Image (cartoon, grey):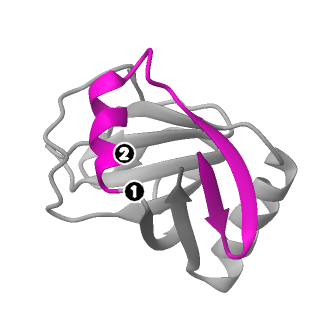
């Protein structure tokens, strides 16, 4: 998979062995284009709020502490549906408290650049993002 954030391309792998239903549901909406903003409560991460969007998946390989490059889908419940991309230290949370999201993909290239984009998003605002095969 290729992810483009603010014009910079990253290689990523879908975690089909760990989160097969989440990966299959996300592939159905690809190519997926949106914007990322900096997380509010979670630390060093990027966030795509998705409101009431329903991927119709339960929890798979869910974590509240993703490593840099890991991408989580929170399939809604105590908070809205959302995607989180960790670029540093993260404790996934919302105004409702700690959340655990499905680890469905991992960025495998240029983690240093991902961190730069994360910090720039914090100070400069939203950036475009696109997920594609």
Residue in the picture at 51% in, 38% down: 91
Q: Which mark is residue 30?
A: 1
The residue that label 2 is drawn on is: 27
Q: Position of residue 65 (x, y in %)?
A: 52, 30
Residue 26 on the magenta segment: yes
Quadrant location of residue 18?
top left
Query: Answer yes or no: do the residues labelled 1 and 2 have beta carbons within 8 Å?
Result: yes
Query: SS of the residue at dot 1?
Result: loop
Looking at the rendered image, the quarter that the N terminus falls into is top right
x then y, percent, for residue 53: 18, 59
Where is residue 10 drawn, in percent x and y? 72, 53
* Tally of marks: 2
Outermost residue toward the front?
133
- 27 vs 36, nearest the viewer: 27
Q: CA distance from mark 1 to mark 2?
A: 5 Å
Residue nearest the viewer, comparing 4 with 127 = 4
The x, y position of residue 11, in whole percent, is 71, 46
Q: Helix or strand or loop: what does disc 2 sit on?
A: helix
Horizontal placement of 3 versus 75: left or right? Answer: right
Which region shows up in magenta? 1-29
Query: How many other residues sit within 10 Å of disc 1, few (<14), some (14-19) or many (≥20)?
Result: few
């Amino acid at each position: 998979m290729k992810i483009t954030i603010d014009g910079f391309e990253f290689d990523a792998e879908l975690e089909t062995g760990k989160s097969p239903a989440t990966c299959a549901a996300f592939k159905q909406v690809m190519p997926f284009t949106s914007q990322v903003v900096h997380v509010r409560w979670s630390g060093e991460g990027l966030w795509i709020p998705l409101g009431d969007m329903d991927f119709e998946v339960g929890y798979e390989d869910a974590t509240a502490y993703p490593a840099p490059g890991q991408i989580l889908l929170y399939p809604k419940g105590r908070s809205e549906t959302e995607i989180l991309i960790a670029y540093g230290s993260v404790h996934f949370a919302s105004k409702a408290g700690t959340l655990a999201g499905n680890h469905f993909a991992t960025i495998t290239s240029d983690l240093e650049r991902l961190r730069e984009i994360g910090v720039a998003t914090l100070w400069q605002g939203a950036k475009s993002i696109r997920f594609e095969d």
